[in-house]
Amino acid sequence: MDEVDLKILRLLQRSATMPVAEIGEQVGLSHTPCWRRIRRLEESGVILRSVAILNPAGVGLAVSVFANVTMASHQKAALTSFERAVQKENEIADCHSVTGTSDYLLRIVVPDVAAYERYLKEHLVHLPNVHQVHSSFALREIKHTTELPI
């Protein structure tokens, strides 16, 4: 990966719908070589996918909850079972294995506090191997970016 690839990636992080010709113009390439570089970045897994980023409140999901989850067991099969179950939960936007007093940090998006209470009682605590959940509600978002500092 060279500086031209990094320039392409910076532009695509800001707007994945930018035309290839415009990207090429900004990085000093014609359309075809620029397109080939983008394809190579996709095929190598550097570019995972191109998506539309939605405003959560605009689609009725105004509440973000951060849940610290502690596991009952740290056996590999138990952790794998939990991680597979998390993949199927639409409300869980992010899941990270973490160090510290909990095992996982989840970001859960819901319409309101009552919806989170229902989700917690009916789903989250029933996921495989969950021992304890500590929840924190985001009051407001100060910074959120999908751009990596490359």
Image (cartoon, helix red, strand yellow):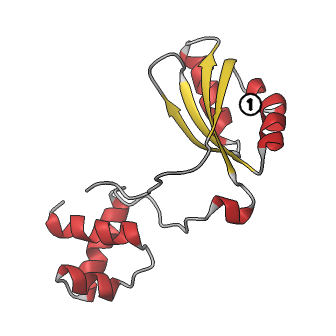
**Residue 31 versus residue 13 in the image, above or below:** below
As drawn, 9 above or below 138: below
Percent of width and height locating residue 3: 15, 65
Horizontal side of 20 relative to 33 (left or right) equals right
For the C terminus, give its image quadrant: bottom left
Q: Quadrant of residue 15?
A: bottom left
Name the residue located 78 percent from the left edge and 47 percent from the top edge.
Answer: 112
Helix, strand or loop at disc 1? helix
The crowding category of the residue bearing disc 1, from other C-alpha atoms within 10 Å (few below 14, some 14 to 19, many at least 20), is: many
Q: Quadrant of the N terminus?
A: bottom left
Question: What is the quadrant of residue 34 in the picture?
Answer: bottom left
Q: Which residue lies at the image location 84% right of the left edge and 32% below the top edge?
A: 122
Q: Is residue 88 above or below residue 80?
A: below
For the point 62% across and 16% down, the residue is 71
For the point 15% across and 63% down, the residue is: 2
Q: Is residue 122 left or right of residue 57?
A: right
Closer to the camera, 87 or 131? 131
Which residue in the structure is indicated by mark 1?
A: 124
Q: Where does residue 19 sit, x and y in percent of width and height?
A: 38, 85
Residue 66 lies, in percent from the top left, at 61, 36
For this view, does 14 lie left or right of residue 91? left
Amino acid carrying label 1: it is Leu
In percent of width and height, residue 147 lies at 38, 58
